[in-house]
Amino acid sequence: MIHRRAVLTGLGVVAPTGGDTAEYWETTLAGRSAIGPITRYDASRHPVRLAGEVRAFDASGTVEQRILAQTDLWTHFALVAAQRALAAANLTTVGGNDFGIGVTTSSSSGGNAFGQREIQALWSKGSTFVGPYQSIAWFYAASTGQLSIAHQLRGPCGVICTEAAGGLDALAHARRVIRRGTRAVLTGGTEAPVSPYAVTCQVPAGTLFTGAEPARAYLPFARDAAGHVPGEGGAMMLLEEAESARDRGVPALAEVTGYAAAFTAPSFDRQDAGGWAPTAPALAAAIRGALADARLSPADIDAVVADAVGVQAADRAEVAALRAALGERATRIPVTAPKAGVGRLYSGGAALDAATAALAIRDGVLPPTPSVTVADLDEDIDLVTGSARRLALENVLVVARGFGGFASALVLSRVPDLASHL
């Protein structure tokens, strides 16, 4: 059976380390971190005081004022990132009768700041002071709906709710509907989890860094890893059927060649914050499945973009999964975790990692993991630290896990017959 190929023809980034895709990539390659004190509210009385915030963000030039008022920041991020992705793919105008383009996003905490504001109005003033858009602004499918309306994308639409694994699952869902006949899908994920309500919901898991020093806030795979911090933003991408891209004369950055997902019941051991220790078998199964789907062997994988929770039990489980799935090559394949410079973006994290992998393939360079040095490492892996590493990248493995037991793996590959550039 011959499958319709799904290639990435446009991407748009909104991240703490960059106001747009180009700035994000430049900053990421330089290994700079954007983690700092929370400014969106007074965090002095809260246990978590650091985050990766998207600063100086202004969506007013891209999104209508009425839409800004009706939606939460996470949707603003998605609308801006999507506009950039469509522009990069040279697809800024879509006819209203075109049912060939769909939308699939990942979602985790939804419109939490908007929801908190409306709940506070309910408690302090009464039900008549709750705005009419509460029901659609916090809703996990809000970004998918707004993107579909804004760009008249009437093809298959959906939303994936698998926490931090969602970005990869959304890309896989997009590939699936392309294989079934859809021409293209606007896909990815964003997150805005830096509000009192959202952060308070994250604290009980016991995986957030509670110190005050940004340079030590997120140290994946380090022996003194003490958790991660929340981060804002994410990425949106246009995944397109290869023949459609060729007919439009649009180059591709990468092709989604492999994907698989698995699930494991989380641990309730109090010594395992977040319940990450049992995740190794599921993640290993997902990696094996993604390689089989791509018809590749471990020898074909040139680099790994890691999940990198920043909790020792989680990081050790991830390394164990890589060893189980990739064998002896696991210690020699370059691994990177750029998210250490932006925070854990939850529904936007894996989408941003996939965008990072595509840019790495395009430019033949793997960005470093901020704040971590080789001397810090707790595990025997080839973590890229310090400076970016020049590599010939044909196939990059991206792995992600979501709180609660989700595990996903995706393979992005160079597209030799469609020249890659933005």
Image (spheres, rainbow, N blue to C red):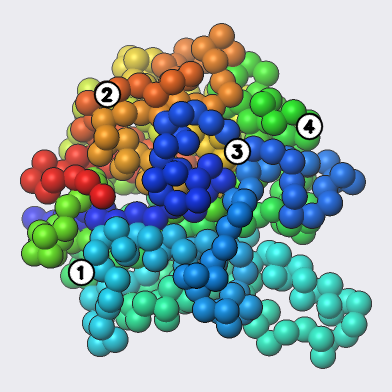
Any part of residue 112 in sight: yes
Observer-nearest of 279 and 110: 110
Instruction: Read off the residue under disc 2.
Output: 391
Q: Which amino acid, mark 1?
A: Arg
Q: Earlier in the sequence, mark 3 or mark 1?
A: 3
Any part of residue 207 in sight: no
Choose mark 3 or mark 1, whichever is in front.
3
Q: Which amino acid, mark 2?
A: Leu
Q: Look at the numbered disc 1 and give the secondary structure of its residue.
A: loop
Q: Earlier in the sequence, mark 1 or mark 2?
A: 1
Point out which mark residue 34 bears.
3
Q: Earlier in the sequence, mark 4 or mark 1?
A: 1
Q: Which amino acid, mark 4?
A: Ala
Q: Are marks 4 and 1 in contact (CB under 8 Å)?
A: no
Q: Are marks 2 and 3 in contact (CB under 8 Å)?
A: no
Within 10 Å of the Cα at label 1, are there few (<14), some (14-19), or many (20+) other Cα atoms?
A: many
Observer-nearest of 266 and 312: 312
Instruction: Read off the residue under disc 1.
Output: 183
Q: Image point 48% across, 76% down: which residue?
A: 146
Q: Earlier in the sequence, mark 2 or mark 3?
A: 3
**Coordinates of residue 382 in the picture (x, y in percent):** 41, 16
